[in-house]
Image (cartoon, rainbow, N blue to C red):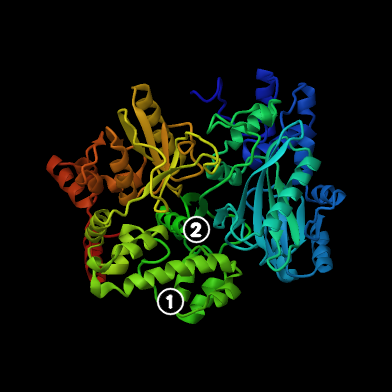
Amino acid sequence: EGMADDVYFLPVTPYFVEEVIKKERPDGILVAFGGQTALNCAVALYRAGVFEKYNLPVLGTPVQAIIDTEDRDIFKDKLDQIGVLTARSVAVTTMADALAAGEKIGFPIIVRAAFALGGLGSGFANNMDELRALAEKAFTTSDQILVEESLKGWKEVEYEVVRDAFDNCITVCNMENFDPIGIHTGESIVVAPSQTLSNREYHKLRSIGIKTIRHLGIVGECNIQYALDPVSEDYRVIEVNARLSRSSALASKATGYPLAFVAAKLSLGYSLAELKNSVTQTTTAFFEPALDYVVVKLPRWDLGKFAGVQRLIGSAMKSVGEVMAIGKSFEEAIQKGLRMLDTGKRGFVGNAPEQADNETIDRLLNQPNEERIFAINQAFEAGYTIERVHELTRIDLWFLQRLYTIFELGQRLTGQREQGLEGLGIDLLRQTKKAGFSDQQLAVQLLGAGDVKADELRVRAHRKALGVLPVVKQIDTLAAEFPAKTNYLYLTYHGTENDLAPETERSIAVLGSGVYRIGSSVEFDWCGVNAVQTAAAEGYKTLIINYNPETVSTDYDVSDRLYFEELSYERVMDILEFEQPTGVILSTGGQIPNNLATRLDEAGAPILGTSAASIDMAENRHKFSSIMDELGIAQPRWNELTSLADMHAFVGEVGYP
């Protein structure tokens, strides 16, 4: 409701799509907005002559251009025509050809499947046996695979490119992977804008991107991925996604440029010059956004929920969600992002100590895995140099230097424990806050892991007494080069004044659902968006706090004010104290907002709906059990145990299972 005139709950397969086309007889069809599934379906319909049969034009990028990007053999030939470099590769359709290609190219190589999503069926092979196993796996997902030279260790860089039917072309955002080639971009930490490229490298890749997209004839939005040699300006184009992708969603949220909206308009025949910048309403869409901030995307894995699963990450996706953090520095953004993942980490430093010998640290650094960024901190603690960590990870020295800055600040705080909180001066406090340290992190580093929540409140009070407060900044797509009023906001300690005043009309704040994970996904975001729409219909101004770039709630046009921020006690209270809303809705965001209920209530936040006390009674097993007993409602026998002996005794009483 509210999304389309008619919605068909059917599989996106050629048979069902043709049935809908036959029934509805649409005037056109858009195929670039449904990801890889929609593209594969469109290609199948095109090859079967369905579009021609019903005289149905494909709007935007022609299907042949989609085939040119998805078929690895054709793609390589198309780019060869304009002198754009691709990796040495051979597209094959049989096992014999795959093995012959491996022998011709030489090991190590990467195997990739055509028409595949999320690196499905891909992997690296160092010998014939590994190639045979990988090819066998890849052929189960596609009838064509690419055997390609390995560029492991090169930088991975992406550009989001927009082109209209009149050949106007711009790059909206460029992004750099924290991890080198060898790890799928969906598995890697991604930074926008790129931080380690020279001006010449940036413009060289930008020009190649525009040249490539024009040659392919793409209309709308697409993503082009490069491998860039870190010791020269040599490059290879890895692939072009002629559709909206997870990178497009990230770029759209990172820049404030509404890529899907603009791509849809361009597909309908508009030119870039005709369209308004939806965020500012004062400039056209024919411009390249300027960023005066840093955005960091981090993936969330739930590998621990699967027994015996391999914890390594690589060219095929395993992550189930992602977060996006915004700051004025890389240090500020990366620490925010690590907390947003909701895995119990307080940031890059200040986490529960983990003992590991040098051999284990070497392995964690050398073999990409979900915990590698924390292994970098362990390495620094063990005395590893930045250069040694670079040798083991191939992560750019610039990123490692920034992480080392965070590590050094953490060490300075720990060194001041004897002086306590009162010894934390304003200069060091500002420095740590600008580097993304949370109040809780400061409490642990400075006071130890005692009563962390109480110590966090002490740090907060000390910080406020010294006048060290975050400021609210706007994302206006223009880096403040032109006057603009936007509702797309974040908080930072790099600044002295807010970009806007608090909301003066009565308002409702809605806490979002945070990162997607197994068991919590888009359903909570839908609830949050509905809560916002209902509050708006009742005449309230609406505020959303969320940080998931994959959600509808983080679209700039859903609420009156969007705070792309952490769902932590500290940050939510910062926003509530600034905005002073009439009420706060927690109950539509799932577990993360619920976990904040008691502390927000104690701080005086005006929680709407179910009270914090009632939420606590439902969440706290002891209190919930007592209520069940009072009401005479049967419940399974349970106990909270602290030793193995007690556990065996309890099992002896109740029996298995």
Q: Position of residue 225 (x, y in %)?
A: 68, 52
On the image, which quarter does residue 246 sit in? Answer: top right
On the image, which quarter does residue 217 sit in? Answer: top right
Q: Do the residues bearing badges 1 and 2 touch, measured as CB atoms within 8 Å?
A: no
- Tell me if 591 is positioned left or right of 19 in this view: left
Q: Position of residue 399 (x, y in %)?
A: 54, 64
Q: Is residue 261 above or below residue 134?
A: above
For this orientation, the residue located farthest to the right is 81
Mark 1 or mark 2: name the one nearer the start of the chain. 2
Q: Quadrant of the C terminus?
A: bottom left
Number of callouts: 2
Residue at 23% x, 51% y: name it: 621
Secondary structure under tag 2 reads helix
Q: Position of residue 329 (x, y in %)?
A: 48, 56
CA gap, disc 1 to disc 2? 21 Å
Q: Nearer the viewer, residue 511 or 49?
A: 511
Which residue is tagged 2? 330
Amino acid type, mark 1: Glu
Q: Is residue 635 above or below residue 310?
A: above
Amino acid type, mark 2: Phe
Residue at 43% x, 66% y: name it: 406
Which residue is tagged 1? 381
Structural crowding at the residue carrying mark 1, measured as other residues with C-alpha within 10 Å and reported as few (<14), some (14–19) or many (≥20): few
Residue at 39% x, 41% y: name it: 545
